Amino acid sequence: MLVAFTISPMGNDNPDGSVHDAVAAAVKVVRESGLPNETNSMFTNIEGSWDECMAVIHDACAAVAAVAPRVSLVLKADIRPGRSGEMKAKLDRLEVALDKLATPGA
């Protein structure tokens, strides 16, 4: 399965509202998990079994909860049994489709 998620502290003491330190604690958990992952400016994506992904998300939430009184979690999952390597494969298929659109008559 692929999971895109974001974890953010609520109620922090940073006067500018910045959350990067708490988010860094969550991303550290993800990166140390050993699961395929990537982080962009809005979400972190991971790939693994249901149990593996949910355990990592749980632990990442706990890392944020250690520094904030409240935690917000948003996630989206693509559950497709029997598949792996989809974090890259989905993008490869997209690029092929885009190439077809760019090449008239292909």
Image: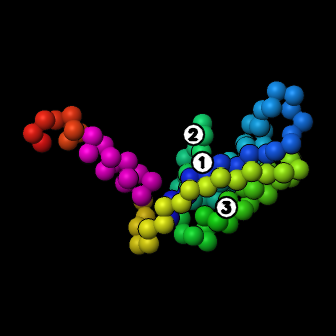
Residue hosting label 2: 40
Residue 27 drawn at (x, y percent)? 68, 48
Segment colored magenta: 86-98
Residue 56 - label: 3
Whether label 1 touches label 2, CB < 8 Å? yes
Q: What amino acid is labelled 1 in the image?
A: Thr
**Residue at left offset 82%, top offset 44%:** 10
Whether label 3 touches label 1, CB < 8 Å? no
Decide if residue 22 is on the left or right side of residue 102: right
Residue 32 drawn at (x, y percent)? 66, 55
Under circle 2, the secondary element is loop
Secondary structure, magenta segment, majority class: helix
Residue hosting label 1: 44
**Residue at left offset 61%, top offset 71%:** 51
Under circle 3, the secondary element is helix
Under circle 1, the secondary element is strand
Q: What amino acid is labelled 2 in the image?
A: Asn
Residue 31 drawn at (x, y percent)? 63, 51
Total marks shown come to 3
In this rendering, does residue 31 appear at all? no
Whether label 3 touches label 2, CB < 8 Å? no
Vertical side of 17 occupied by 90: above or below: below
* Gap between marks 1 and 2 measured at Cα: 6 Å
Q: Earlier in the sequence, mark 3 or mark 1?
A: 1
Q: Answer with the quarter of the image where residue 98 lies.
A: top left
